[in-house]
């Protein structure tokens, strides 16, 4: 018995350095991944899309979280990546800052360099409001970006149009989809920008065609212990009751949840690289 106890103690002492090394390697990998942007290309088929918009390229950036952990230079690099994709339209789905309004000028300087012939459109997220939502919105507008707050715009191309809607953040209870829908019809293609993907059920009831969201960071740190097996991923999805990342559909309403560029809580990502999304809209 005493010998067994001594053996276990020796094994623990032997394993501790190895565990520390593995933890350091994991943290290093997660820190590097947090700054490695990926471009996700994704086709979206829309039954009511006018033929003039067939093949339109729509880029999405989300959850930038300009802070000490994501510099203005890195944001500008993501902007250059996005411009190089030559999108026709760009959607920004909230949370541009995290900690302080002092980061508003930097992030809006960078985002002001975005270029798309049909426009750059933005909504606000919960962190923007928790910091200074009015100042954030004003700075985005000053940078030449159209900010949508419970409203819509008509995007014209050739002799056709689509409706682009944007709602305010759900966490701070400022969202009003009904207001954004005023002046639109179900016969039109309607694309909704909502920072929080929890809007999906309401959007489906309203027969929105496509929702673009962020907020979740795709989980940010996806530990293999929890997410490695399909049944565990399904369990997490049921427990969270929300869409974490990527594509889904509810009835005839499609949604894409962008993984975001920045981080919160810890400046790490694991199994969840920051993302720039490029969607090609296809008429069916």
Image (cartoon, helix red, strand yellow):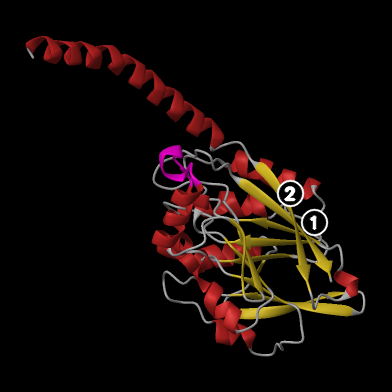
- Identify the residue shown where x is 45% and y is 65%: 129
Where residue 85 appears, x then y in whole percent? 80, 48
Answer yes or no: do the residues labelled 1 and 2 have beta carbons within 8 Å? yes
Q: 10 Å neighbourhood of mark 2: few (<14), some, or many (≥20)?
A: many
**What main secondary structure does the magenta stretch of the protein show?**
loop
* Residue 168 seen in the current view: no
Image coords of residue 92 (percent x, y): 63, 60
Q: Return the residue nearer the eye: 211 or 10.
A: 10
- The residue located at (75%, 78%) in the rendering is 189
In the displayed structure, 129 sits above or below 9; it is below
Q: Is residue 256 magenta?
A: no
The front one of 6 and 260 is 6
Quadrant of the image occupied by residue 147: bottom right
Residue that carries the numbered disc 1 in the rendered image:
87
Horizontal side of 263 relative to 73 (left or right) equals: left
Q: Helix, strand, or loop for circle 2? A: helix
Residue under label 2: 82
Along the polypeptide, which appears first: circle 1 or circle 2?
Answer: 2
Can I make out residue 222 in this image?
yes
For the image, the number of numbered tags is: 2
Q: Tell me the magenta residue range.
A: 220-229
Q: Residue at image x 45%, y 23%?
A: 25
- Secondary structure of the residue carrying tag 1 is loop
184 and 218: which one is in front? 218
Where, quadrant-wise, is the N terminus in this rendering?
Answer: top left
Where's residue 161, x and y in %?
82, 78
Residue 243 placement (x, y as % from top left) = 52, 61
Vertical comparison of 57 with 166: above or below: above
């Amino acid at each position: 018995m005493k010998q067994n106890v001594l053996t276990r103690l020796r094994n623990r002492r032997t394993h501790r350095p190895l565990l520390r090394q593995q933890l350091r390697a994991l943290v290093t990998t997660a820190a590097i991944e947090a700054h490695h942007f990926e471009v996700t290309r994704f086709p979206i088929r829309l039954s009511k899309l006018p033929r003039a918009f067939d093949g339109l390229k729509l880029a999405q950036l989300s959850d930038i979280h300009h802070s000490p952990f994501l510099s203005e230079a890195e944001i500008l690099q993501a902007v250059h990546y996005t411009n190089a994709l030559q999108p026709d339209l760009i959607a920004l789905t909230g949370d541009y800052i995290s900690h302080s309004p002092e980061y508003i000028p930097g992030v809006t300087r960078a985002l002001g360099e975005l270029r798309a012939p049909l426009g750059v459109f933005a909504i606000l997220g919960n962190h923007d409001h928790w910091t200074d939502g009015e100042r954030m919105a004003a700075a985005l507008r000053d940078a030449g970006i159209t900010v949508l707050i419970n409203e819509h715009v008509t995007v014209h191309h050739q002799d056709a149009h689509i409706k682009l809607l944007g709602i305010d953040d759900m966490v701070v209870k400022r969202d009003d989809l009904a207001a954004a829908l005023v002046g639109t019809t179900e016969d039109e293609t309607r694309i909704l920008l909502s920072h929080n993907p929890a809007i999906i059920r309401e959007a489906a009831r309203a027969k929105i065609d496509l929702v673009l969201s962020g907020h979740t960071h795709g989980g940010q740190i996806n530990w293999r212990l929890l997410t490695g097996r399909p049944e565990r991923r399904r369990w997490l999805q049921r427990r969270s009751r929300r869409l974490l990342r990527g594509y889904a559909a509810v009835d005839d309403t499609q949604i894409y949840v962008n993984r975001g560029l920045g981080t919160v809580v810890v400046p790490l990502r694991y199994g969840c690289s920051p993302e720039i999304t490029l969607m090609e809209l296809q008429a069916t």
